[in-house]
Amino acid sequence: MLITLDGAGPRYAQITRALRNLIQSGGLPFDARLPPTRELARDLNCSRNIVLLAYEQLVLEGYLVSRQGAGTFVSPAWPRSGRDTGPVAAKAVPMRVSSRGRQMVDAAEKARAAMARRPGLAIDFMYGLCDPDPRVVARLRAAFNSALRSRTFRYGPPTGDPELRQQVVDRIRGSRGITCTPDQIVITNGAQQALDICVRLLLDPGDRMVVEDPGYASAHAVFIGAGATLVRVPVDSQGLDPETLPRDGKSVRAVYVTPSHQFPTGAVMPAARRYALIDWARRRGAYIIEDDYDGEYRYAGQPVAALAALEPHGRVIYCGTFAKSLFPSLRLAYLVVPPGLAHALVHAKWLSDLGSSALLQHALAQLMATGEYDRHIRRMQKHYRSRRQVLLGALKRHLGDAAGVVGASAGLHVVLWFTKLPPERVTSLVDACAARGVGVYPIGGHATRRLRHAGLILGYGLTEATQIERGIELLAAAYQEISAMAPPPRRAAGSKRR
Ligand SMILES: Cc1ncc(COP(=O)(O)O)c(C=O)c1O
């Protein structure tokens, strides 16, 4: 038999590959008999054992079948289209999952679609992402190597690395006004896991939970996946308004809020509303889950103390993450829990994954202990402040009064409301930007009510200052194109508004 070997790697692997390719390309039809191993070995000038190894591998992969006393054949069960050139994936026949599983998948599908990133664009204003600077990456590499040298190979405590928890306690006292002990800190794999654990621990299926609208779709998906019934309350320019919280007397187990930089609108909740929210939660016996996802970056206004700093009676669970202060792939975050909840939370975390990576936590604790983490934050604050200035300047220059910018006082994104463009036309605007190589993202995926205007979230965690000017110029051109086109026929009135 004539087969061509590619010369790469061990001989048995070359023969396996050549035969597999031959089968996939139709060169060996169903049920074709392969030459005896001795014969092929002679043809290929190699030992019979090498050919035997290749045949065994292909039997294992399902391409060949061996029939006692008859020889080796191309498997008739091998599924092929006749034009296959690569390995064939098993056909995905949807399999039954539980109704809870269905709920999880539906919620996650919706949230992921709302936040999907457009691939391959030259200038991308994707939010929620950032790159650390090379200096901190080098320090982290050294800290990680040192964790390997010190043989940090065992499971760590499920609460997290003791040094890291102490470092977190020291940071949030100064920066967020939160006084707590390391026993109240639980290190998690990102804020996402922190929220997942909290909601599963605190809510029974069907329990009501208040969330912001618009709000963080990923978190809402976690809550829905855990069986919570969401009560969506509108946010305004000061974030969630405690006046709009449910007053129907029915139980509410928890409120999830982003008071320091509301996601996505960027509103900062003033102190009076914070006290009113705490008061409401206390009277209703509800927990507050405070997500402070980008609190490290604040550019204007006085810092407002975290809800967890204002409420000494154990109603607030605070969540911080290293996703913005360092980078999202680190997957490390933390919860500050009331003392009375610490025991339960640690067990829930243990149940979930036995604890976050001890190696990574050890490395991060070293980064913080040496002061390198704080230096990094200070450098990044300067860096993002200047990017933000470039962005605000470009928006003013290219869009003028056509769009209002909000939420620019903190974080790594701003929100742009187009005063004359109805929300239905935002998809056309996004597409027109994509056609010019610019990625912009609608706010609508995070809202359930009809918005008054078309709105975009513009992230600047990834976008270099040099690209921002050009990106906004192209966004303005796309806006001109879309607003010059005739609007599509209006839908029936009667939907709710922002
Ligand atoms: C509101 C909010 N919370 C939390 C996070 C970060 O989550 P994680 O720590 O799971 O990456 C983000 C990321 O964009 C966010 O927007």
Image (spheres, grey):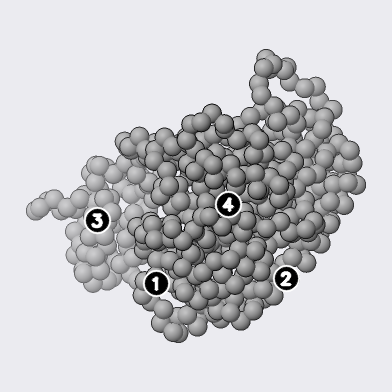
Mark-to-mark CA distance, 3 and 2: 56 Å
Whichever of callouts 2 and 4 sits on the residue coming sooner in the sequence is 4
Q: Which mark is residue 60?
A: 3
Side (left or right) of 447 relative to 458: left
Mark-to-mark CA distance, 3 and 4: 52 Å
Numbered disc in front, either 3 or 4:
4
Whichever of callouts 2 and 1 sits on the residue coming sooner in the sequence is 1
CB contact under 8 Å: marks 3 and 1: no
Instruction: Residue under label 4, please give it.
Output: 290
List the single residue furthest toward the left: 69
Whichever of callouts 3 and 4 sits on the residue coming sooner in the sequence is 3
CB contact under 8 Å: marks 3 and 2: no
Q: Quadrant of residue 406?
A: top right
Classify mark 4: residues with Cα within 10 Å, few (<14), some (14-19) or many (20+). many
- Is ligand 1 within 8 Å of the beta carbon of the residue shown at mark 4? no
Mark-to-mark CA distance, 1 and 4: 26 Å
Q: Which mark is residue 378?
A: 2
